[in-house]
Amino acid sequence: MSLLRTTAILLFTGALFSHGTGLHAQQTREQLAARLPSSNLSGGEVQATRSQLLAAPGFARARVPHNPGAPDATAVGEATCISCHQLEADHFTHTLHSLGLHAANQADASVPVCEACHGPGSRHAQAPFEKGTIIAFTKAGGTPIEVQTATCLNCHKGGPRDHWSGSVHQRNGLSCSDCHNPMANFSGEGFMARNSISDTCAQCHKDVRVQFNRRSHMPLPEGQMSCADCHNPHGSITSPLLKTNTVNETCYQCHAEKRGPFLFEHAPVRENCLNCHSPHGSNQNTLLVAPVPFLCQQCHTGQRHPNDLLTSQSLATGSNPDERIMGRACLTCHANIHGSNAPSGPRFHE
């Protein structure tokens, strides 16, 4: 049988194995792996391929990282770690990292468990209170932030983390453990350090969190979205860490009807949604940065309409009510304010 065909069978069988759990599933995987067809691979390569097949995907290549604080340390194994850290082991047991690393370790004894993240533990076992002898993921643990993040990126590199280096979070000395806690299931996804993604972000971004308490806001407090729907906290090519290249592209992910194309475009709308809207929350309708018509008058003064300066006194409750700002004000007539394909489109009439 050709090498290509054998590899395809291995990958297909591995996909089936990934759905099995428990002792019965482990025995089934071993039985099926033993019946794999012969190939022109050497015996060692076949054994290595079978070991990777039985291991949990994504964990089979885990290795002990280098700890600059203890360059001469050697690996001691999970049992030595648990002898002192029983409480931490109990918390870790039901996490995805624990399940994956243990499955990989059963298939290949060279795959570490505790030391896959914390580095070789011999020096730490000899001097448990000496800082730096183990890779610690706390501010007071003695491990530099660069070493902490590099350890995580050994497995989690690429994808959304392509722009971590040089990002605002990296430049401000944040560690992965400031936002994530892989040792416990505090959140439903992402091993967050708080109950949710948004609660984790709010640890630092308290000013933004307050904006969501305003009268008009994104549905984040209701749990219908999170900060990560618009932002990539691991870095991006934009300064506010947007998931897309521009503000408008981010908004169009949900507000596709505002994308166009339009025969008649409204220039400030096409330039940036933030010209008119506050993205997190506002005390004005529809997240506007100011109430209409005062928002419109920032650009449109003395054009076509009488150039009266409309103030709060022109409102219905003011001393000089003006019919032009009743109801939806400018939007009563110019309803298609984001753009129009109608014959009357140049003035965005409905």
Image: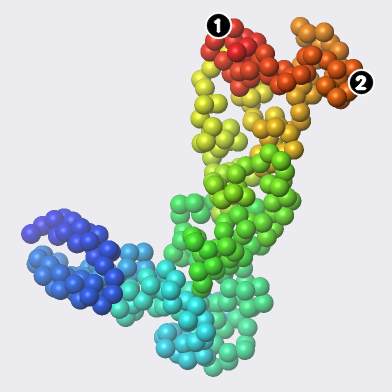
Residue occupied by mark 1: 343
Figure label count: 2
Residue beneath the point at 71% across and 41% down: 215
Type of the residue with mark 2 = Ser
In which quadrant is the C terminus drawn?
top right
Q: Name the quadrant containing residue 176.
A: bottom right
Residue beneath the point at 36% across and 64% down: 58
In which quadrant is the N terminus drawn?
bottom left
In the rendered view, tell whether residue 297 sits above or below residue 144.
Answer: above
In the rendered view, tell whether residue 29 sits above or below residue 166.
Answer: below
* Disc marking residue 319: 2
Tag in front: 2 or 1: 2
In the rendered view, tell whether residue 160 sits above or below residue 27.
Answer: above
In the rendered image, is residue 266 in sight? no
Type of the residue with mark 1 = Pro
Question: Where in the figure is residue 112, as x and y percent of width and height?
Answer: 39, 78
Residue nearest the observer in this picture, 40 or 284: 284
Q: Name the quadrant containing residue 255.
A: top right
Lower position in the chain sequence, tag 2 or tag 1: 2
Mark 2 and mark 1: Cα distance apart in space: 38 Å
Question: Where in the figure is residue 284, as x and y percent of width and height?
Answer: 73, 34
Question: Where in the figure is residue 127, as x and y percent of width and height?
Answer: 58, 92
Apparent side of residue 308 relative to residue 14 in the rendered image (left or right):
right
Apparent side of residue 202 relative to residue 226 in the rendered image (left or right):
right
Apparent side of residue 294 relative to residue 59 in the rendered image (left or right):
right
Apparent side of residue 120 relative to residue 132 in the rendered image (left or right):
left
**Proximity of marks 2 and 1: CB atoms separated by less than 8 Å:** no
